[in-house]
Each structure stands twice: as C-alpha cells, then as structure tokens.
Amino acid sequence: MTMTLTIQERIQQMEQEEQELQFSMFTNDTALELGLAVVEEARKRNKRITVDITRGGHRLFLHAMEGMSPENEDWIRRKNNVANHFGTSSWRMACQLQSEGTTMEAKHGLPFVDYVGAGGAFPLHVRGEGQIGTITVSGLPDQEDHDLLIAALRRFLT
C-alpha cells in the first residue's frame, strides 16, 4: 500500500532531495553519462520522455525518445526557467504555489508562456560551487517526471 504524502510533506521531501542530490564535480562527460542514465531509467519503467541537461545556458545533452514531440522541448524550456529562477525543482515550486492557492504569474509576475509550475526540472548543484545548471524530463505527468528523474539521480550518484 502506497502512503500518500500531504503537499507540505512532499515539499519537505523535495527540499531534502535538493540538499542530498549534489555532485562533487560536473563535466560534459558527466552530462552524457547522466543523460544516458535517465534514458535507461525511463526504458526500465517502459516510459517515453525527452531529457535535457544544461549547464550555464549551454545544452550538454538532449534526447527525445520515440513518440516525443517538439512540444516537450518547450515544456523543458519553461520548467528550466523555473528551476533557474528559483533554484529549486520545478515540481517543488509548483507544489508550493498550489499550497498557497496562487500561480507563478499572480505571485511572481512570471508569464505562463515562459514559466510553468510542472514537475520535471531539477537544479544541478556542485558542492562548493552552487547551482551550475538543470536536468529536466518531459513527457509524463508532473509527479512521474519528477520521480523518474530523482530515481535516476539517486542511482547515478550512489
């Protein structure tokens, strides 16, 4: 039986993930290996996604599995904008706004066309450097995008 978390418990869990899932170093080769690990995680779950890894505005990895569309890349762009603006996962920000009964546009003046509160973008942190980029998944429902990404990051970092 799966235990359902409250929105506040989910937010706390995501804060902990952001503290825990950090890199000691991150290179272009790291991006390639990590991107392939995310694709492998999706295959294991029999899911199709698009995955993007960007460091400092430079796209280091992009792969769209069969069945994905250019629309997924626009979702990635908008989710990345959230993760970069707030320094948190896009799903954590979406849940936080939902718990407050507001939207990104209403609370922060950020246009929906460029910022979306949806699961799938996660800030890439290097210990001692801070946030260096984002890793983003698109193609599944919000919580699934986030969970798939977290599972791949956990496996990659252990």
Image (spheres, rainbow, N blue to C red):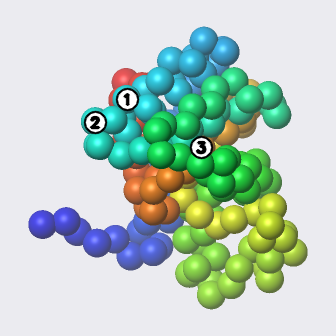
Of 154 and 48, the residue lying toward us: 48
CB under 8 Å between callouts 2 and 1? yes
CB under 8 Å between callouts 1 and 3? no
Residue 128: give its label: none
The image shows residue 63 at horizontal and vertical percentages of: 57, 32
For image coordinates 82% across by 34% down, the residue present is 57
Image quarter of the C terminus: top left
Q: Disc 2 marks which residue?
A: 44
Instruction: Give the Cα distance between marks 1 and 3.
Output: 15 Å
Specify whether 83 is left or right of 155: right
Q: Disc 1 marks which residue?
A: 40
Residue 136: give its label: 3
Q: State the image quarter where residue 133 is shown.
A: top right
The image shows residue 30 at horizontal and vertical percentages of: 57, 17
CB under 8 Å between callouts 3 and 2? no
Q: Secondary structure at mark 3?
A: strand
